[in-house]
Amino acid sequence: MRILDRYILKSVLALFFQCLLTFLFLYIIIDVFSHLDEILKQQVSLHILRQYYLAYLPIIFVQVAPIACLLSTLYTFGKLNRNNEIIAMRAVGLSIFQITKTVIIFGVIVSVFVFWVNDRFVPSSMSLTEKIKTQMESGTKRAKEKEREIITHLSMYGLKNRLFFVNKFSLATNTMENIIILEHDEKQNITKKIVANKGVYRDGLWRFYQSVTYNFDENVQVKGEPQYLEEEIMDISETPHDFLKQMLRPDFMNIAQLDDYIWRLSKSGATTAIRNLKVDLYQRFAFSLTSIMIILLGIPFSVIMKRRATGLSSVGLSIMVGFLYYVLNAISIALGKTGMLMPALAVSLSHIVAFLSALYLIDTLP
């Protein structure tokens, strides 16, 4: 590595970690004081607080890493510009790419690390912090009672093209009430509808009570007489644990779980839900590119920065560029979930605009 590359990288790394630690510290302090009344009221122990904020660290890192990258890039090259070092580098024949390639490589490394943390740690961290937060707000006893309560309006897309609707599901007794099951063929046409008053999971089998089965022909018309059974053992491979897993919010799932959930969902033809989940899935990949894209956007601004404006301009420009970037990203994702943009285009539109804008601005630099 050249001396110049080490010089630039050392400055960027130092500023990046300073910004990261500052953001982490401010977030925790602000969050503690905003919930101080609840903490004191529930007499939350230091052990639970430590566990909560340690679990929250991956989430905070993923959120603030791109802004830390932008701020460190702006300040580093702004300082070089203030000291006329950029002019000296250009005078000896170095291009903008040669000057900034170390920071660009650093941005790629940060993006890869953000992707790994976002997939490996963030979903489990969000689930854990949700549970701990419930304990802090409601008390440990009430939180445990909540885990045993009845879940209402449960729906699940299961195997064999089955769509389940359950009005009530008791976790303690593995009992479902007011059940509707729709079975589909490969073309997503309804072939069977099962309505049952109650279902109980016992000895590895589902037993349905007071069930009525309707069969449908290829024109989705009722075929034959409905079949009523007082008690029926159902050929359903899903266990109560499988039903609970499907209750996970998409942001509590990693990429593999979310992809599997979309596959299950696709068997039932729920196009709107599938589209929204695909946007969430593709966003997991696209979000990791934010760090490198935001660095590319910051390079031209930092190079043209005025001499005396290095410090405050770095902060101001980082806020402005980051705000516009995230606004565009939020708008494109919203358009993707409404069906106006394809999911892949919705999550990548902000990156495409940012990349093309950065290339244009860098190309127009003197």
Image: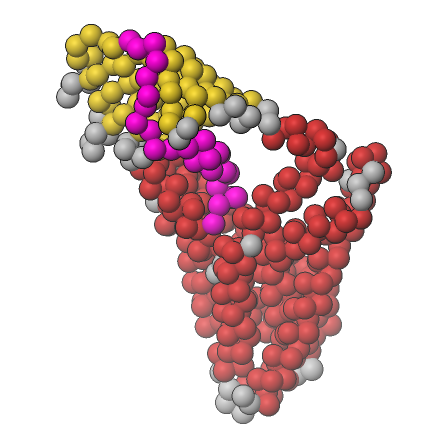
Q: Is residue 52 left or right of residue 165?
A: right
Confirm whether the magenta stretch covers residue 238.
yes
Q: Which region is colored magenta?
A: 228-254
| Residue 361 shows in this picture | no
Instruction: Name the residue located 41 percent from the left edge and 12 percent from the top edge.
Output: 197
Can residue 49 be seen in this snapshot? yes
Q: Is residue 336 above or below residue 308?
A: above
Q: Is residue 218 above or below residue 126?
A: above
The quarter of the displayed image where residue 232 is located = top left
Residue 227 sits above or below residue 192 on the image: above
| Horizontal relation, residue 72 to residue 339: left or right | right
Q: Nearer the viewer, residue 46 or 11?
A: 46
Front-most of 149 and 138?
149
Q: Residue at x 46, y 52 (%)?
A: 284
Looking at the image, the residue that sits furthest to the front is 203
Query: How is this picture coloured?
Result: secondary structure
Check residue 296 for magenta coloring: no
Pinpoint residue 8: horizontal percent, then vertical percent.
61, 80
Q: How many marks?
A: 0
Q: Position of residue 60 (x, y in %)?
A: 64, 54
Which quarter shows the N terminus? bottom right
Query: Residue 175: x and y, percent?
Result: 47, 21
